[in-house]
Protein backbone atom coordinates (compact mmCIF):
# COMPACT_ATOMS: atom_id res chain seq x y z
CA UNK A 1 0.00 0.00 0.00
CA UNK A 2 3.05 2.30 0.13
CA UNK A 3 3.27 3.94 -3.29
CA UNK A 4 6.34 6.00 -4.01
CA UNK A 5 10.09 5.51 -3.77
CA UNK A 6 11.27 2.12 -2.61
CA UNK A 7 12.02 1.96 1.10
CA UNK A 8 15.33 0.57 2.26
CA UNK A 9 15.55 -2.86 3.86
CA UNK A 10 16.03 -1.56 7.43
CA UNK A 11 12.87 0.56 7.22
CA UNK A 12 10.94 -2.37 5.75
CA UNK A 13 12.21 -4.71 8.52
CA UNK A 14 11.22 -2.24 11.24
CA UNK A 15 7.76 -1.88 9.70
CA UNK A 16 7.26 -5.65 9.51
CA UNK A 17 8.40 -6.19 13.12
CA UNK A 18 6.08 -3.42 14.28
CA UNK A 19 3.10 -4.88 12.37
CA UNK A 20 3.74 -8.40 13.69
CA UNK A 21 4.03 -7.14 17.25
CA UNK A 22 0.52 -5.63 17.13
CA UNK A 23 -1.15 -9.06 17.01
CA UNK A 24 -2.02 -10.63 20.37
CA UNK A 25 -3.31 -14.04 21.34
CA UNK A 26 -6.56 -13.83 23.27
CA UNK A 27 -7.09 -16.12 26.26
CA UNK A 28 -10.06 -17.65 24.41
CA UNK A 29 -7.76 -18.94 21.66
CA UNK A 30 -8.35 -16.26 19.02
CA UNK A 31 -5.90 -13.72 17.62
CA UNK A 32 -6.84 -10.06 17.66
CA UNK A 33 -5.18 -6.82 16.65
CA UNK A 34 -4.13 -4.91 19.73
CA UNK A 35 -5.16 -1.26 19.68
CA UNK A 36 -2.43 0.67 21.46
CA UNK A 37 -1.11 4.17 21.21
CA UNK A 38 1.08 4.17 18.10
CA UNK A 39 3.63 6.59 19.55
CA UNK A 40 4.19 4.35 22.60
CA UNK A 41 4.57 1.35 20.30
CA UNK A 42 7.02 3.11 17.99
CA UNK A 43 9.02 4.44 20.95
CA UNK A 44 9.30 0.86 22.23
CA UNK A 45 10.37 -0.38 18.80
CA UNK A 46 12.97 2.36 18.35
CA UNK A 47 14.29 1.68 21.83
CA UNK A 48 14.52 -2.02 20.97
CA UNK A 49 16.41 -1.23 17.76
CA UNK A 50 18.81 1.08 19.64
CA UNK A 51 19.62 -1.54 22.30
CA UNK A 52 19.60 -4.26 19.64
CA UNK A 53 22.26 -2.42 17.65
CA UNK A 54 24.37 -1.99 20.80
CA UNK A 55 24.03 -5.68 21.67
CA UNK A 56 24.88 -6.60 18.07
CA UNK A 57 28.03 -4.47 18.18
CA UNK A 58 28.92 -6.10 21.51
CA UNK A 59 28.17 -9.56 20.09
CA UNK A 60 30.19 -9.16 16.89
CA UNK A 61 32.97 -7.18 18.58
CA UNK A 62 33.56 -9.61 21.46
CA UNK A 63 33.34 -12.64 19.17
CA UNK A 64 35.80 -11.14 16.68
CA UNK A 65 38.22 -10.15 19.46
CA UNK A 66 38.10 -13.69 20.84
CA UNK A 67 38.79 -15.14 17.37
CA UNK A 68 41.69 -12.74 16.85
CA UNK A 69 43.12 -13.81 20.21
CA UNK A 70 43.27 -17.41 18.98
CA UNK A 71 40.07 -18.89 20.42
CA UNK A 72 38.17 -21.21 18.06
CA UNK A 73 35.27 -19.36 16.43
CA UNK A 74 32.69 -21.86 17.76
CA UNK A 75 33.83 -21.39 21.36
CA UNK A 76 34.15 -17.61 21.04
CA UNK A 77 30.68 -17.45 19.49
CA UNK A 78 29.12 -19.50 22.31
CA UNK A 79 30.79 -17.49 25.10
CA UNK A 80 29.90 -14.19 23.47
CA UNK A 81 26.28 -15.22 22.98
CA UNK A 82 25.89 -16.00 26.69
CA UNK A 83 27.39 -12.62 27.71
CA UNK A 84 25.21 -10.73 25.24
CA UNK A 85 22.04 -12.58 26.32
CA UNK A 86 22.53 -11.39 29.91
CA UNK A 87 23.10 -7.83 28.66
CA UNK A 88 19.93 -8.08 26.53
CA UNK A 89 17.76 -9.30 29.38
CA UNK A 90 18.42 -6.25 31.51
CA UNK A 91 18.32 -3.69 28.67
CA UNK A 92 15.04 -5.13 27.35
CA UNK A 93 13.45 -5.34 30.79
CA UNK A 94 14.51 -1.89 31.99
CA UNK A 95 14.72 0.28 28.85
CA UNK A 96 12.59 -1.33 26.15
CA UNK A 97 9.56 -3.15 27.54
CA UNK A 98 9.79 -1.49 30.99
CA UNK A 99 8.23 -4.40 32.86
CA UNK A 100 8.30 -4.10 36.66
CA UNK A 101 10.42 -6.46 38.73
CA UNK A 102 7.33 -7.24 40.83
CA UNK A 103 7.21 -10.47 42.79
CA UNK A 104 9.87 -13.14 42.95
CA UNK A 105 7.54 -15.57 41.13
CA UNK A 106 6.97 -13.12 38.27
CA UNK A 107 10.71 -12.45 38.02
CA UNK A 108 11.54 -16.18 37.84
CA UNK A 109 8.76 -16.77 35.31
CA UNK A 110 10.11 -13.96 33.14
CA UNK A 111 13.69 -15.26 33.42
CA UNK A 112 12.62 -18.79 32.43
CA UNK A 113 10.70 -17.44 29.43
CA UNK A 114 13.63 -15.25 28.45
CA UNK A 115 16.12 -18.14 28.67
CA UNK A 116 13.82 -20.35 26.58
CA UNK A 117 13.25 -17.67 23.92
CA UNK A 118 16.93 -16.75 23.75
CA UNK A 119 17.93 -20.43 23.66
CA UNK A 120 15.96 -20.66 20.40
CA UNK A 121 17.78 -17.69 18.90
CA UNK A 122 21.09 -18.90 20.38
CA UNK A 123 20.68 -22.10 18.35
CA UNK A 124 19.75 -20.14 15.20
CA UNK A 125 22.81 -17.91 15.63
CA UNK A 126 25.26 -20.64 16.65
CA UNK A 127 24.37 -23.20 13.96
CA UNK A 128 23.70 -20.49 11.36
CA UNK A 129 27.27 -19.23 11.76
CA UNK A 130 28.63 -22.77 11.45
CA UNK A 131 26.52 -23.31 8.32
CA UNK A 132 27.70 -20.08 6.72
CA UNK A 133 31.37 -20.57 7.65
CA UNK A 134 31.85 -24.27 7.00
CA UNK A 135 29.28 -25.10 4.32
CA UNK A 136 28.90 -21.81 2.46
CA UNK A 137 32.56 -20.76 3.00
CA UNK A 138 31.74 -17.26 4.24
CA UNK A 139 33.92 -15.32 6.67
CA UNK A 140 33.15 -15.45 10.37
CA UNK A 141 32.58 -11.69 10.50
CA UNK A 142 30.14 -11.73 7.57
CA UNK A 143 28.31 -14.71 9.05
CA UNK A 144 27.89 -12.97 12.43
CA UNK A 145 26.54 -9.85 10.70
CA UNK A 146 23.97 -11.77 8.63
CA UNK A 147 22.78 -13.87 11.56
CA UNK A 148 22.58 -10.80 13.81
CA UNK A 149 19.90 -9.24 11.58
CA UNK A 150 17.82 -12.44 11.67
CA UNK A 151 18.30 -12.88 15.42
CA UNK A 152 17.32 -9.27 16.23
CA UNK A 153 13.97 -9.73 14.48
CA UNK A 154 13.35 -13.10 16.14
CA UNK A 155 14.36 -11.77 19.56
CA UNK A 156 11.94 -8.86 19.32
CA UNK A 157 9.01 -11.05 18.37
CA UNK A 158 9.77 -13.68 21.01
CA UNK A 159 10.42 -11.07 23.71
CA UNK A 160 7.18 -9.29 22.92
CA UNK A 161 5.06 -12.45 22.68
CA UNK A 162 6.67 -14.72 25.31
CA UNK A 163 8.83 -12.87 27.80
CA UNK A 164 8.10 -9.26 28.68
CA UNK A 165 4.35 -9.47 29.06
CA UNK A 166 2.19 -6.94 30.84
CA UNK A 167 0.48 -8.00 34.06
CA UNK A 168 -2.84 -8.21 32.19
CA UNK A 169 -1.48 -10.92 29.87
CA UNK A 170 0.11 -13.01 32.63
CA UNK A 171 -2.42 -13.07 35.44
Image (cartoon, rainbow, N blue to C red):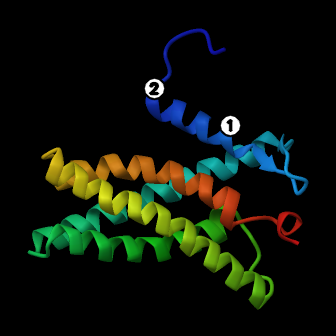
- Decide if residue 132 is on the left or right side of residue 112: left
Q: Which of the labelled discs sits on residue 19, or is there none? A: 1
- At which x and y percent is residue 32? 84, 42
Find residue 8 and name its label.
2
Left/right placement of residue 96 relative to residue 39 reads: left
Q: Residue furthest left?
A: 70
Residue furthest top as drawn: 4
**Dot 2 or dot 1, earlier in sequence:** 2
Callout 1: 10 Å neighbours few (<14), some, many (20+)? few
Q: Nearer the viewer, residue 143 or 102?
A: 143
- Residue 72 place in picture, x, y as percent: 14, 72
Q: Going by the image, does 112 lie left or right of 150?
A: right
Place residue 124 in its image quadrant: bottom left
Residue contact between numbered discs 2 and 1, judged by CB atoms under 8 Å: no
User: x, y (%) of residue 164?
Assistant: 70, 66
Measured in 3D between alpha carbons, the distance from the residue under mark 2 to the one under mark 1, in whole angstroms, is 17 Å
Residue at horizontal 67%, vertical 41%? 20
- In the structure shown, which secondary structural element does the residue marked by tag 2 occupy? loop
Secondary structure at numbered mark 1? helix
Q: Is residue 42 above or below residue 68?
A: above
**Residue 17: where, in percent of width, then height?**
60, 41
Crowd tier of the residue under label 2, counting other residues whose Cα lies within 10 Å: few below 14, some 14–19, many 20 or above: few
Amino acid sequence: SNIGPKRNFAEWLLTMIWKLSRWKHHSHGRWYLQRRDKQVKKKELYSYVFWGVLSTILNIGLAQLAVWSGIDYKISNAITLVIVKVFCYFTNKIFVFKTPFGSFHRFITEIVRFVFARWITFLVDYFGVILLVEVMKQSFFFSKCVLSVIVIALNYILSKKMVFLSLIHIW
